[in-house]
Image: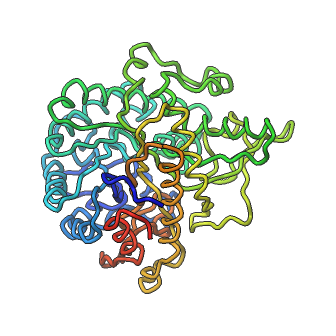
Amino acid sequence: MSPWPHNFVWGAATAAYQIEGAWQEDGRGPSIWDAFAHTPGKTFQNHTGDVTCDHYHRVEEDVALMQAMGLKAYRFSIAWSRLLPQGRGEVNEAGVAFYNRLIDCLLAHGITPWVTLFHWDLPLALQLELDGLLHPGIADHFARYGELCFARFGDRVKHWITLNEPWCSAVLGHGLGYFAPGRVSRAEPYVAAHHLLRAHGRIVDVYRRKFQAQQGGVIGIANNCDWREPRTDTPADRAAAERGLEFFLGWFADPIYRGEYPAVMRERVGARLPEFSAADRALIQGSSDFFGLNHYTTMYAAEPPTGAAAGPSSLAGNGGMAEDQQVALSEDPAWEKTDMGWNIVPAGCRRLLQWIDRRYGHPPIYITENGCALPGEEDVAQAVQDGPRSAYLQRYLAAAQAAIVEDGVDLRGYFVWSLLDNFEWAYGYSKRFGLHHVDFATGKRTPKASARWYAEVIRRNALP
């Protein structure tokens, strides 16, 4: 197959709460994930992100790892409460200094920073004082935080992502209770999602009005979606698969590209699905310069048997609220799985890229996360021999390349999740996605075989 486009962005990704540590240092305020992880029983063996990879004290070491791989770009998130300990009000200059240090170090080593403004770690004060994402005013606090970041970092940062996987904040945080703030509801996910979209629109509006022309950057959002493959070729199963995708990705992408939620959601959710005001719609529609996609797995989708309820079959499989979308999810027992129990189906990645390309008018796309957790990687000797990870990346990249070459999809970049083994949210340190092994007792980093494999892909701009 032909090489990738000459300017293809090869990157790796992380998130602040998962790698930074230093949770009470230099004026950082607590986030909802600090509170959640410190609540007994919420995470695997009550693990927390208090120290994790200690990236806060190891910036230069970690950038050296990136340079050794030849990374073109590094996607990281800013911890809102490190800049604004209360989520609003006084700026913590030590937090600003930390991100200046990271950004300057990246640029000095020829690595382009891609900054995510919100990767789930809402300042705890905004949760306690305003009920967090359920308060309409939260969108304005997001926008003011975004403006601070553009003002302080936008002279050097030219690639912005407003939100990471708002589906997870809405469904896992406010529907199923698996993630912070740990709420369980059939109504709250739609409210949280609505305010996240409003926040995205406001942040982008601030950037475009006040900064974009002068700074010359781009801004978008990173949504997650698993592919939904029709279980059979019947019209009912094809419709169920489409419905599953619209409840999962369309929920967040349709308002941005089409100005409204999918019609099937409006029909099935009814009054629990909020309405956009004309002012909100004007800010949200057309508010992404690129389409950021986090993709990991695939499930079969089918119309449930008459009278049967389709409940969530797994964390990965519950695309939107199961009771509302009524899609029966299943899998092929022959599919290989990652340590997360997620199916390895590279063809699903290609089909999802095709779906996005068709539905949203051929947007520029970046795969902002893709990768796998493997078992047994606590032991460094085993972890560094991670051939299955290289094989996973090879297969998914081949599918993505086919989408470019054969389908005409405008895919412009790919970010591996993740640069480092890290705190995997509710799974704590029990799941490892990193290209580099981290000994969480000592902080020692060790490159895995996949880091060397990926470095060769980047060097050649071609798959082996």
Q: Is residue 150 left or right of residue 433?
A: left
Provide residue 280's location: percent of width, then percent of height. Answer: 40, 19
Residue 249 in picture, x, y percent from top left: 54, 38
Q: Is residue 42 above or below residue 389?
A: above
Can residue 51 be seen here? The reply is: yes
Residue 339 locus on image (x, y percent): 57, 68
Write down the quadrant of residue 236 in the picture: top right
Residue farthest along the bottom direction in this orientation: 381
Seen at 35% across and 59% down, the residue is 12
Q: Nearer the viewer, residue 227 or 196?
A: 227
Left or right, residue 83 beside residue 291 = left
Residue 105 falls in image quadrant: bottom left
Image coordinates of residue 197 in percent, x first then y, are: 43, 30
Compare residues 429 and 5 and report the one nearer the observer: 5
Residue 100 vertical position relative to residue 191 in the rendered view, above or below: below
**Quadrant of the image for the C terminus?**
bottom left
